[in-house]
Image (tube, grey):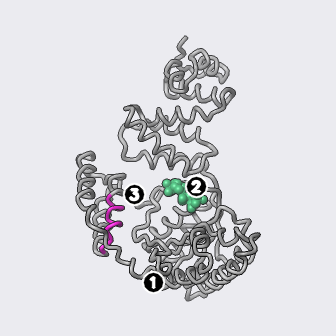
Amino acid sequence: MVTVSRTDYHSPDGLERAVIDLVRVGTRGHGAGVRQLASRLMRSVPMGVQDTESFRDAVHQAIASGSDITGLRCTSGTVPTEGDNAQPLADVDLLPDGDGLALDETVMSQLEEIIAERERADELRRAGAGLTRTLLLSGPPGVGKTMTAGWLAQALGLPLVLLDLSSVVSSYLGTSGRNIKSVFDYAKSGPCVLLLDEFDAIAKRRDDDTDIGELKRIVNVILVELDHWPDTNLLVAATNHPQLLDAAVGRRFDRSLTLPLPGLEQRHAIFRHLASGIDGVDTQVLDLVAELSSGMSSSDLTRLWSLARRRSILKRVAVTDVLVSELARHVEDSGSGRDRLFLTLHSALGMSNRQIASLTGVSHPTVATGIKRAGGTKHGGRTEQ
Ligand SMILES: Nc1ncnc2c1ncn2[C@@H]1O[C@H](COP(=O)(O)OP(=O)(O)OP(=O)(O)O)[C@@H](O)[C@H]1O
Ligand SMILES: [Mg+2]
């Protein structure tokens, strides 16, 4: 089972929830948050809106007319900065967005457990069982580690404080221990989810002697924080290289989750989410696209979708056609994978050999041979000679 966030506005009660969210963000004077919400509304237009296109236009115009007013960044004054530079050390997202997160059932159920623990925090505290305070997320690039922190913050209704350790460690090495401590103190000043992104940055330079002292200081600061992290807040660390971390650091987390590359179900869910609210998308082709994109990361899928969408608008063709022809290039030049692709396009989608040929950039006799090799004649598809 795949769970996609329930905060999608394209649902029967979407309009009510959008208004409430808008009031919530607006009363905090958070201009960037209002704009973020507006783009979310344009992406997933609430059901019941009569004319989707004019609604999108109107929201777009409303954003454009307000864009010359500087957003009131209500918390910026208190976010710690690096010395005279006045650059905030952490980003604060008051309206974190994890919409459309698709993860496999095991990982998703653990995330839901973390939410459930917080809903019944008093009961757990009274029983002395405690809550998950710290979570380590590992996995290859682009599988949704950063997004998961946003999803958790959104589900918990908390702001997300994001500290990119790689930038803090590289740009301010001499003072990074102190800087990191000040971000921890800031994050503990109120309920929030603190994300320590690119967490392995604290381990990466170990072979570089000049940095050893400072990195040790940073690791010590982090170990102390992990041990004393308050259970009102959630600390999430994300890394692509868990093997680089000291075992002592890894063990300090209450939970550790590995996010895998998306399986077929997740790829289906991601494409369906991306396609929701867009008219005329053929779901059968979309499912084929999910099958063809095996081995790609979720972030690759999202980028591929955006590219296909832009190209489909420019060339006035279906977004799924662009997706299939992009993916067909990745299917081996010859062989059973490509033959299966031809067969599916032919028998499931009823495309002619010529159409398949022009979509995938091969000659139509090659398509015919491929379909035969894949056993197509038995499937009763329309065979064009
Ligand atoms: N599991 C997922 N479900 C849906 N969309 C996803 C998922 N993972 C990634 N994406 C899409 O890819 C984008 C980038 O993902 P994200 O930055 O969270 O990955 P990451 O694991 O943190 O990558 P990195 O290791 O490069 O930091 C997301 O904003 C989202 O659009
Ligand atoms: Mg990330």
Measured as percent of width and height from the top left, residue 86 is found at: 44, 77
Between marks 3 and 2, how big is the CA–CA gap? 22 Å
Percent x, y for residue 69?
26, 66
Is the Cβ of the residue at disc 3 closer than 8 Å to that at disc 2?
no
Residue 274 can be seen, yes or no: yes
Q: Which residue was labeled with disc 2?
A: 142
Q: Which residue is mark 3?
A: 8
Q: Amino acid at mark 2?
A: Gly
The kind of residue on which mark 3 rests is: Asp
What segment is highlighted magenta in the picture? 29-38
* 117 within the magenta span: no
Give residue 30's quadrant in the image: bottom left
Earlier in the chain: of badge 3 and badge 2, it is: 3
Q: Which is more N-terminal, label 3 or label 1?
A: 3
369 and 57: which one is in front?
57
Look at mark 1 in the image and give the residue it sits on. 190
**Residue 81: where, in percent of width, then height?**
47, 79
Query: Considering depth in this image, is 199 or 234 the residue closer to the camera?
Result: 199
Vertical order, 369 against 170 (above or below): above
Percent coordinates x, y for residue 210 in the rendering: 72, 75
Q: Main secondary structure of the magenta part?
A: helix
Q: Classify the position of the C terminus by image quarter.
A: top right
Above or below, 89 against 288 in this view is below
Q: Quadrant of residue 168?
A: bottom right
- Quadrant of the displayed image that contains ligand 1: bottom right
Q: Secondary structure at mark 3?
A: loop
Disc 1 marks a residue whose amino acid type is Gly
Q: Residues within 10 Å of mark 2 (few under 14, many from 20)?
A: many
